[in-house]
Amino acid sequence: MSTEATDDLTDEERTLFGAYDTAADLAARCRQLTDMSAPSSAGALKDIVNTVMAAFWDQGFSQTEIRNAFAAAVADMNRYAAGQERR
Protein backbone atom coordinates (compact mmCIF):
# COMPACT_ATOMS: atom_id res chain seq x y z
CA MET A 1 0.00 0.00 0.00
CA SER A 2 1.07 3.53 -0.62
CA THR A 3 2.51 5.40 2.31
CA GLU A 4 1.17 8.60 0.73
CA ALA A 5 -2.45 7.88 1.62
CA THR A 6 -4.71 10.84 2.18
CA ASP A 7 -6.25 9.51 5.38
CA ASP A 8 -4.84 9.39 8.90
CA LEU A 9 -4.65 5.60 9.04
CA THR A 10 -1.44 3.67 9.45
CA ASP A 11 -0.53 0.92 7.00
CA GLU A 12 -1.39 -1.58 9.74
CA GLU A 13 -4.85 -0.04 10.21
CA ARG A 14 -5.50 0.00 6.45
CA THR A 15 -4.53 -3.68 6.25
CA LEU A 16 -6.65 -4.61 9.27
CA PHE A 17 -9.71 -2.70 8.07
CA GLY A 18 -9.23 -4.17 4.60
CA ALA A 19 -9.27 -7.66 6.14
CA TYR A 20 -12.51 -6.79 7.97
CA ASP A 21 -14.01 -5.60 4.68
CA THR A 22 -12.90 -8.82 2.98
CA ALA A 23 -14.55 -10.88 5.75
CA ALA A 24 -17.81 -8.95 5.32
CA ASP A 25 -17.66 -9.45 1.54
CA LEU A 26 -17.06 -13.19 2.02
CA ALA A 27 -20.05 -13.45 4.37
CA ALA A 28 -22.24 -11.60 1.83
CA ARG A 29 -21.19 -14.02 -0.94
CA CYS A 30 -21.94 -16.99 1.32
CA ARG A 31 -25.41 -15.52 1.96
CA GLN A 32 -25.94 -15.10 -1.82
CA LEU A 33 -25.02 -18.74 -2.40
CA THR A 34 -27.32 -19.93 0.36
CA ASP A 35 -30.18 -17.81 -0.96
CA MET A 36 -29.79 -19.37 -4.41
CA SER A 37 -30.92 -22.70 -2.91
CA ALA A 38 -29.10 -24.57 -5.66
CA PRO A 39 -27.90 -28.09 -4.85
CA SER A 40 -24.27 -27.03 -5.21
CA SER A 41 -24.71 -24.17 -2.72
CA ALA A 42 -26.30 -26.31 0.02
CA GLY A 43 -22.99 -26.90 1.82
CA ALA A 44 -21.34 -23.68 0.70
CA LEU A 45 -20.88 -22.15 4.16
CA LYS A 46 -19.23 -25.27 5.55
CA ASP A 47 -17.06 -25.69 2.48
CA ILE A 48 -16.01 -22.05 2.38
CA VAL A 49 -15.15 -21.96 6.09
CA ASN A 50 -13.05 -25.06 5.47
CA THR A 51 -11.34 -23.26 2.59
CA VAL A 52 -10.67 -20.25 4.85
CA MET A 53 -9.08 -22.61 7.37
CA ALA A 54 -6.90 -24.12 4.64
CA ALA A 55 -5.95 -20.65 3.40
CA PHE A 56 -4.78 -19.70 6.91
CA TRP A 57 -2.73 -22.91 6.97
CA ASP A 58 -1.24 -22.07 3.56
CA GLN A 59 -0.29 -18.61 4.88
CA GLY A 60 1.81 -20.21 7.61
CA PHE A 61 -0.52 -20.05 10.61
CA SER A 62 -0.16 -23.03 12.92
CA GLN A 63 -2.90 -25.56 13.59
CA THR A 64 -3.06 -24.22 17.14
CA GLU A 65 -3.41 -20.60 15.99
CA ILE A 66 -6.17 -21.51 13.54
CA ARG A 67 -8.01 -23.75 15.99
CA ASN A 68 -7.80 -21.11 18.75
CA ALA A 69 -9.07 -18.37 16.42
CA PHE A 70 -12.08 -20.44 15.33
CA ALA A 71 -12.79 -21.57 18.91
CA ALA A 72 -12.60 -17.98 20.20
CA ALA A 73 -14.97 -16.82 17.45
CA VAL A 74 -17.49 -19.55 18.27
CA ALA A 75 -17.17 -18.82 22.00
CA ASP A 76 -17.95 -15.14 21.31
CA MET A 77 -20.93 -15.88 19.08
CA ASN A 78 -23.59 -15.82 21.82
CA ARG A 79 -22.46 -12.39 23.03
CA TYR A 80 -22.43 -11.05 19.49
CA ALA A 81 -25.77 -12.63 18.56
CA ALA A 82 -27.41 -11.71 21.90
CA GLY A 83 -28.73 -15.24 22.21
CA GLN A 84 -30.62 -15.14 18.90
CA GLU A 85 -30.26 -18.10 16.55
CA ARG A 86 -30.46 -15.96 13.40
CA ARG A 87 -30.35 -12.25 12.61
Image: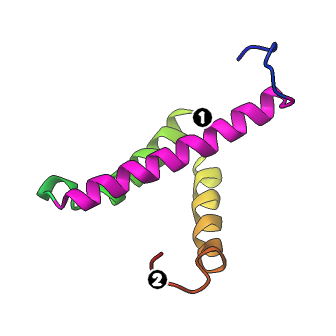
Name the residue tied to disc 2. 85
Q: Identify the residue at image location x=26%, y=61%.
A: 35
> How many residues crowd around disc 1 within 10 Å: few (fewer than 14), some, or many (20 or more)?
few
In this rendering, position of residue 9 left or right of residue 29? right
In this rendering, position of residue 24 left or right of residue 13? left
Front residue (pair 30, 71)? 30
Q: Amino acid at mark 2?
A: Glu
Residue 35 magenta-drawn?
Answer: yes
Whether label 2 touches label 1, CB < 8 Å = no
Q: Amino acid at mark 1?
A: Gly
Outermost residue toward the front? 6
Relative to 58, residue 43 above or below = below
Residue 33 spot, x, y in % from top left: 27, 53
Which region of the structure is painted magenta? 8-37
Residue 68 magenta-drawn?
Answer: no
Q: Identify the residue at image location x=48%, y=45%.
A: 25
Residue 52 spot, x, y in % from top left: 46, 46
Residue 69 spot, x, y in % from top left: 63, 57
Q: Identify the residue at image location x=81%, y=15%.
A: 3
In this rendering, position of residue 43 left or right of residue 65? left
Name the residue tied to disc 1. 60
Task: Identify the secondary structure beneath mark 2.
Answer: loop
Mark 2 or mark 1: which is in front? 2
Label 2, label 1: how many angstroms apart (C-alpha)? 33 Å
Lower sequence index among marks 2 and 1 = 1
Where does the N terminus fall, quadrant-wise? top right
Residue 11 spot, x, y in % from top left: 79, 26
Mark carried by residue 79: none
Q: Identify the residue at image location x=65%, y=66%.
A: 72
